[in-house]
Image (cartoon, grey):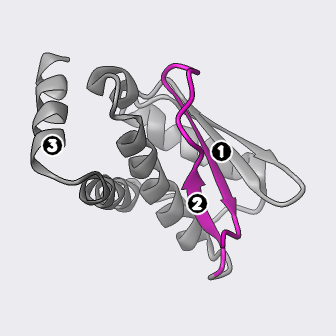
Amino acid sequence: MEFNRALAAELSAGLPPEEIRLLFNRIGERIAQALPVARCDTVDELNSHFNARWDSIEWGFASLHEEADHLRITHACSPLAMSFGPGAEDWVGSLFEGAYQSWFVAQGIPGGLRVRADAPSDSGPEVVLRLGRFA
């Protein structure tokens, strides 16, 4: 944990927040490419495949919930959220944006849909994201 906190401090000191977000987004994309998800026919099946990938690296789990205008993705128990400490929630959200976006693109989602993390909250090591259309 101390390594990750030191890494977070150095990133914060050396890079603007938007560059850190882009870096973590690309890392998330690479994780998704290294852990591909097979084509799925249902949201439940997709949820199971996501969780199998996260379980294989012990990185928590996802819950997918269909809403009227988006798909809500709740990612719980991320070791990254816990180990980077306060102030890194935005980066962690960006990492999961990259991973889930890559997996959804591989599923063949329409080009106008994007994954976006909600603003960090006090919910602990939980990241809430949405797949939808954003302005």
Badge 1 vs badge 3, beta-carbon distance below 8 Å: no
On the rendered structure, is 96 left or right of 121? left
Q: Position of residue 93 (x, y in %)?
A: 46, 44
Mark 2–mark 1 distance (CA, rounded to whole Å): 9 Å
Q: Where is residue 123 in the image (x, y as percent from the top left)?
A: 58, 21
On the rendered structure, is 130 left or right of 52? right
Of labels 2 and 1, earlier in sequence is 1
Badge 2 vs badge 1, beta-carbon distance below 8 Å: yes
* Residue 21, picture quadrant: bottom left
Residue with the mark numbered 3: 11
Residue with the mark numbered 2: 115
User: Which stretch is magenta?
Assistant: 112-135
Of labels 3 and 2, earlier in sequence is 3
On the rendered structure, is 127 left or right of 85? right
Residue positioned 12% across, 41% down in the render: 13
Residue with the mark numbered 1: 73
Give the amino acid at mark 2.
Val
Residue positioned 31% across, 61% down in the render: 22
Please rate how many residues cluster around mark 2, counting C-alpha atoms within 10 Å: few if below 14, some from 14 to 19, many from 20: many
SS state under label 1: strand
